[in-house]
Amino acid sequence: MRVTNLNLHDALKQYFGFSKFKGLQEDVIKSIINKEDVFVIMPTGGGKSLCYQLPALIQEGTAIVVSPLIALMKNQVDAIRGISEDEGIAHVLNSSLNKGDVARVMNDIKRGVTKLLYVAPESLTKEEYIDFLKTQKISFVAIDEAHCISEWGHDFRPEYRNLKNIIKRIDNVPIIGLTATATPKVQEDILKNLGITNATTYKASFNRPNLFYEVRPKTKDVEKDIIRFVRRFKDKSGIIYCLSRKKVEEIAQVLQVNGIKALPYHAGLDGKTRAKHQDMFLMEDVDVVVATIAFGMGIDKPDVRFVIHHDIPKSLESYYQETGRGGRDGGEGHCLAFYSYKDIEKLEKFLSGKPVAEQEIGHALLQEVVSYAETSMSRRKFLLHYFGEEFDEVNGEGADMDDNVRNPKKKVEAKNEVKILLEIIRDTKE
Ligand code: ADP
Ligand code: MG
């Protein structure tokens, strides 16, 4: 089928109600329609889903979408069903379906009405499904959250490793990988493991110019520091991340005692309480949520003005994801991390119980966190460099939005230290 620019925009309007493509979406979609293998790297919220949904809807056949989370798949399927009279336009194939459900899904695919078939990677290993899909017209296979294929990613899933062979068995169709993790190592792993090293790659910038990055030494006064900081943001929303549930409860209490409207959030609270606290945050009945990393997936509060890390996270990917929840509306988001080497040692200790390969990777990721925390250069440049992106620390967008750039550490001091060191070395040699 011939697709012109005009009907791409029409389809965008008709199916999604948007009048403009976001970022690189249009180019990605054109490549997919052009039957290229495509690799898409965009930060969370960048609009990756539409990159495969739109071409799936306007092309012949069924697009297979591999996604790791059942909840996310269900959301997407519900959204897509909303745009069509025929429910069969999108389906999920997973272990929760009974025989009758599966028969219906297969029938809709055969009828040619199913444009998007969401599957969990483990379901795709079922011979029965592979044999069936082999006989159908498949437009392409999209692998969402493709970093799950890499041990260097933050969410490794071994089942992702089989995908390449399974896809080959189904059909020789274009493969689309999508991820928000942009470290060069993960990127390389994805391309290699999906067998698409020649894929057309689209990478959006990971720069968040409206986020201010700051690292402070963590002392015994950290709680006072946090209270003082939060008070500057009266009636504004913020998130405070802690490593342990116990710390979450402690800090939430300390804030409450100090007249700050704060609530805890962690996986130890029952579902009802968690939902209540999250809603109160969204409705602004409380200003601050103190949380473990259990908080955040799918949270889309646009005006989060600060993200504090009471404990430094285990990787810069995590740090970027968690701070990324600040300033979604484009207004300033202040990202403050408290850092002490003791916390790194604690994280190292967690690692020691893990398999050796995991330990090595965890250790390397932690070293990057240390370097970030201890650097005296532009933190934005450091973060973006970590994601394989060059940043002009003088003219780049948001260049002055970090502590190191605003208040450079005095070079003289460093020079003096080197001089003293050299003297010591000389003295010890003599
Ligand atoms: P990602 O998977 O990259 O994190 P999503 O696909 O979930 O991002 O999209 C993030 C948000 O952006 C969604 O709310 C989506 O509706 C919106 N969005 C996507 N494309 C557009 C567009 N062209 N115009 C406006 N909003 C868009
Ligand atoms: Mg997504």
Image (cartoon, rainbow, N blue to C red):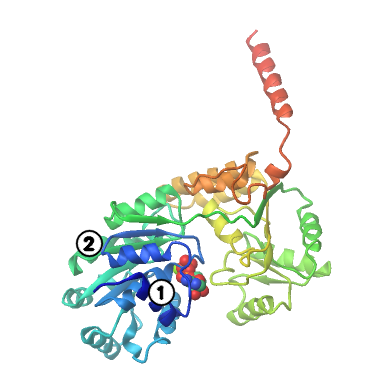
Q: Position of residue 168 (x, y in %)?
A: 20, 63
Classify mark 1: helix, strand or loop: helix
Bin the neighbour count of mark 1 within 10 Å (Cα to Cα): few under 14, some 14-19, many 20 and up. some
Q: Nearer the viewer, mark 2 or mark 1?
A: 1
The answer to which of 99 and 231 lies nearer the viewer is 231
The answer to which of 196 and 312 lies nearer the viewer is 196
Left/right placement of residue 403 relative to residue 74 reads: right
Left/right placement of residue 257 relative to residue 290 reads: right
Q: Residue at x 37, y 88 (%)?
A: 84
Classify mark 2: helix, strand or loop: helix
Q: Which residue is mark 1?
A: 9
Left/right placement of residue 84 relative to residue 372 reads: left
Which mark sits nearer the N-terminus, 2 or 1? Answer: 1
Q: Residue furthest top?
A: 430
Q: Residue at x 47, y 80 (%)?
A: 17
Q: Position of residue 350 (x, y in %)?
A: 54, 52
The residues bearing labels 2 and 1 have C-alpha atoms spaced at a distance of 35 Å
Q: The C terminus is located in which quarter?
A: top right
Q: Which residue is mark 2?
A: 165
Q: Please, is residue 158 above or below residue 122 in the view? A: above
Q: Is residue 120 visible?
A: no
Q: Residue furthest right?
A: 258
The answer to which of 357 and 320 lies nearer the viewer is 320
Tell me the kind of residue under disc 1.
His
Q: Are marks 2 and 1 in contact (CB under 8 Å)?
A: no
Q: Position of residue 135 (x, y in %)?
A: 16, 77
Tell me the kind of residue under disc 2.
Asn
Which quadrant of the figure has residue 408?
top right
Q: The N terminus is located in which quarter?
A: bottom left
Q: Is residue 313 visible?
A: yes
Bin the neighbour count of mark 2 within 10 Å (Cα to Cα): few under 14, some 14-19, many 20 and up. few
Q: Position of residue 323 (x, y in %)?
A: 61, 59
